[in-house]
Image (tube, rainbow, N blue to C red):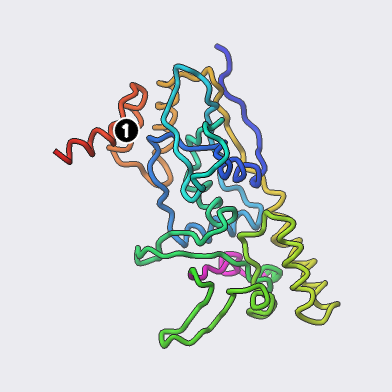
Amino acid sequence: MAKTFESGDIPLADLLNQAHQGILQLPDFQRGWVWDDDHIVSLLASVSRSFPIGAVMTLETGNADVRFQPRLLEGVPSSATADEPKYLLLDGQQRTTSLYLALRSGAPVPTRDTRKKDVERWYFADIDACIDPDADRNDAILSLPADKRRVSARGDVLLDASATEMQVRAGKAGLFPLDIVLNPAAITDWQVAFLMAGPPEEQVKIWKSFQEALILPFLHYSVPRIALDQKTTKEAVCQVFEKVNTGGVELTVFELLTATYAAENFRLRDDWKRRQAI
């Protein structure tokens, strides 16, 4: 039997760019994005340490007999350049979407806190903690509200990272905004402001250490990818989806059935909504 998949690594920046352009989309039978703030912080910390975060699985489109309705990843603008995706993301949605929202979307991440309350968050790297070999990297990734300020119960501003000039002086050594970590031009602009924020020799030393500790790991990070080609049958796609999505955030019976019926061009979720409306 001919091999219908290939495996290899894809740079993280390329994966997120594909999502941003609409080249990579989701099959409509995929569940929604559900990760909370703590999961996102942990994921960002892992990437910053060059730790593995698991593989993604994609399906190449173009097979006339395998046509799933696509939809953009959460946060991708509706003006995404590609009308039709080249790839559908079968496994790795939660991780890919979390990284896209935090690093590439240019907007605060709509997520949930530990009390399951809906919140919006920006993510920053505490430079001093990142260059401290004894610091917990999870503690070095800060989650700030949509206004990029942390306030006390009385409303006093405890931390303000709402502008670059404040970020370079926040905390002990500065707070670096992770939404620019894959954008070399934006990194350079931020670096200039950082180097001007203190004694030149000291700032240069800190920046070199921080660049090595966090920026380069993000820029050089690659994600293992299993790519199913066009010859993969619709039934095989749905079976693979069911098997790979029974771990992580567990799917409900309804969601597994939705994937199964998708093989027969039957959209169970839409049918259920119509029946509820009767």
Report the span colored magenta: 134-145
Q: Please state the horizontal and vertical placement of residue 50, each as a whole percent of the image.
A: 66, 52
Above or below, 133 against 58 in this view is below
Q: Can you identify the residue that label 1 sits on?
A: 258
Residue 149, compared with residue 51, is above or below; it is: below
Residue in the image at 63% along x and 51% along y: 51
| Residue projecting furthest to the right | 201
Asked if the stretch drawn in magenta spans residue 240, the answer is no
Residue visible at 61% across and 47% down in the picture = 52
The residue depicted at 45 percent of the width and 64 percent of the height is: 120
Q: Quadrant of residue 275?
A: top left
Q: Nearer the viewer, residue 50 or 96?
A: 96
From the viewer's perspective, tell me whether residue 131 is left or right of residue 244.
Answer: right
Q: Amino acid at mark 1?
A: Thr
Please indicate whether residue 207 sits to the left or right of residue 86 in the image. Answer: right
Q: x and y percent of residue 273 in the render?
A: 23, 39
Tag 1's secondary structure? Answer: helix
Q: Quadrant of the C terminus?
A: top left
Rate crowding at label 1 as few (under 14), some (14 to 19) or many (20 or more) other CA atoms within 10 Å: many
